[in-house]
Amino acid sequence: MRRANVYCREVLAGILENGPAGYRFQYVPDYLHHAAGPAISLSFPKQAAAFESPSLFPFFFGLLAEGDNKALQCRILRIDEDDHFTRLLKTCAVETIGAVSVREVP
């Protein structure tokens, strides 16, 4: 099971996991109870229950580079172009579009 911390405005919002059955995102309890913390997207309203999908959620896929930028990142970082989770971990820790960033759990 591979895991990543998902931050919203530099505050830990949830955990994204990738395993044999697919992907799972769940908000952390502290973020759920923080009234000022917004949902990370409209597709992930704040709730205690986990979100599950057999493929990478469209919201997270939207954070990834496309076209020539994708090819360049994959070549430089030596990542398979079809390994979306690794691409997310290696390229979405800083300077993402919007307030959400994704960082690998050490």
Image (cartoon, rainbow, N blue to C red):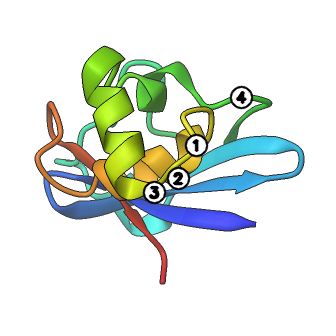
| Mark 4 vs mark 3, CA separation in Å | 18 Å
Residue lying at the far bottom of the rendered structure: 106
Q: Earlier in the sequence, mark 2 or mark 4?
A: 4
Neighbour tally class for label 2: few under 14, some 14-19, many 20 plus, Cα within 10 Å: some
Q: Earlier in the sequence, mark 3 or mark 2?
A: 3
The answer to whether residue 10 is left or right of residue 20 is left
Residue beneath the point at 61% across and 41% down: 83
Q: Earlier in the sequence, mark 4 or mark 3?
A: 3
Amino acid type at circle 1 is Asp
Which of the numbered marks, if any, corresponds to residue 80?
A: 1
| Mark 3 vs mark 2, CA separation in Å | 18 Å
The answer to whether residue 18 is left or right of residue 68 is right
Which of the numbered marks, if any, corresponds to residue 14?
A: 3
Q: Label 2's element?
A: helix
Label 1 or label 4, whichever lies nearer to me, is 1
Q: Name the residue beneath numbered marker 2.
A: 86
Q: Earlier in the sequence, mark 1 or mark 2?
A: 1
Q: Position of residue 72 (x, y in %)?
A: 29, 36
In this rendering, the answer to whether 8 lies above or below 67 is below
Amino acid type at circle 4 is Ser
Residue beneath the point at 45% across and 46% down: 87
Label 4 or label 3, whichever lies nearer to me, is 4
Q: Are marks 1 and 3 in contact (CB under 8 Å)?
A: no
Q: Are marks 1 and 2 in contact (CB under 8 Å)?
A: yes
| Mark 2 vs mark 4, CA separation in Å | 13 Å
| Mark 1 vs mark 3, CA separation in Å | 26 Å
Amino acid type at circle 2 is Thr
Residue lying at the far front of the rendered structure: 75
Q: Are marks 2 and 4 in contact (CB under 8 Å)?
A: no
Q: Position of residue 34 (x, y in %)?
A: 27, 58
Q: Name the residue beneath numbered marker 4.
A: 55
